Amino acid sequence: KQSNVIAPSILSADFARLGEDTAKALAAGADWVHFDVMDNHYVPNLTMGPMVLKALRDYGITAPIDVHLMVKPVDRIVPDFAKAGATVISFHPEASEHIDRTIGLIKDSGCQAGLVFNPATPLSYLDYVMDKLDLILLMSVNPGFGGQKFIPTALDKLRQVRRRIDESGRAIRLEIDGGVTANNIGEIGKAGADTFVAGSAIFNAPDYKSVIAAMHEQLAA
Ligand code: DX5
Ligand code: ZN
């Protein structure tokens, strides 16, 4: 298991002051920026694209940007996100016609590749691509909105994926996304996650720093 990473989802940030709010979360101790891309087609919401990511880079955000694509089709938009400055690009297997090709496209564009599993998506999608992945992202809510409640079956799924990653011997990050708070992050970490997305828990709090510190404390306990 790798070092713990806290990745605030800027879906819950102030869109009218996105650069400032993102920088504030990083200054408060966040490690990565989680960037949720929704297309009103694969998921019933519409957020931001490569131009917004590029604007964050131009604003001076240098932290890793973890792009979570909830779009269909996937392939056409991958090079645009790579050029805009993405670090990791993750996609949902149901949204890609050719999963292996999409992973190759992400890697060839110079980014790390992640595969995302919805609460009811079977882990069998991992069977033939584990050797190419840098990150596995398990959704603990159905994708589309921030502020939903953590679905507890994700804990057992985390344990299963942790086992598979350990058996693979590869340094694959295990990320969890949806309903993560300072109250449940401890047990989520014990189930095997090392990378934690949190949107509303951080951006709806009056003091980002104390939430992020509380999360690290719970993970260390
Ligand atoms: C949901 C997004 C999540 C979401 C998390 O589709 O992928 O990243 O913003 O928000 P919270 O932490 O509020 O559940
Ligand atoms: Zn996300």
Image (spheres, rainbow, N blue to C red):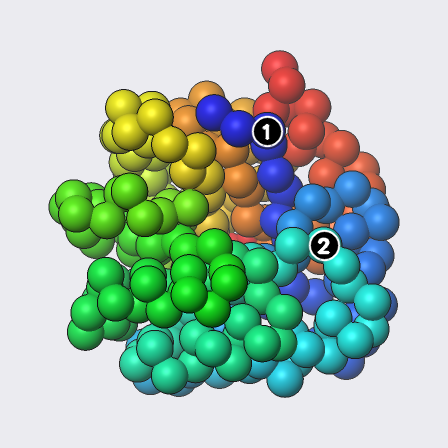
Q: Which mark is residue 63?
A: 2
User: Residue lying furthest top in this view?
Assistant: 221
Mark nearer the N terminus (2 vs 1): 1
- Estimate the spatial distance between the alpha carbons at disc 2 and disc 1, rounded to whole Å: 16 Å
Q: Say which of 75 and 203 sits in front.
A: 75
Q: Is residue 189 above or below residue 23?
A: above
Is residue 39 shown left or right of residue 156? right
Is residue 38 in view from this perspective?
no
Residue at numbered disc 1 = 3
Residue type at numbered disc 2: Ala
Query: Residue 183, percent across and down?
Result: 58, 32
Query: Residue 70, percent across and down?
Result: 39, 71
Q: Is residue 31 above or below residue 76?
A: above
Is residue 160 shown left or right of residue 18? left
Callout 1: SS:
loop
Quarter occupied by residue 162: top left
Callout 2: SS:
loop
Q: Residue at x 23, y 64 (%)?
A: 99
Q: Say which of 101 and 214 sits in front.
A: 101
- Number of residues whose C-alpha sits closer than 10 Å to that of mark 2, classed few (under 14), some (14–19) or many (20 or more): some
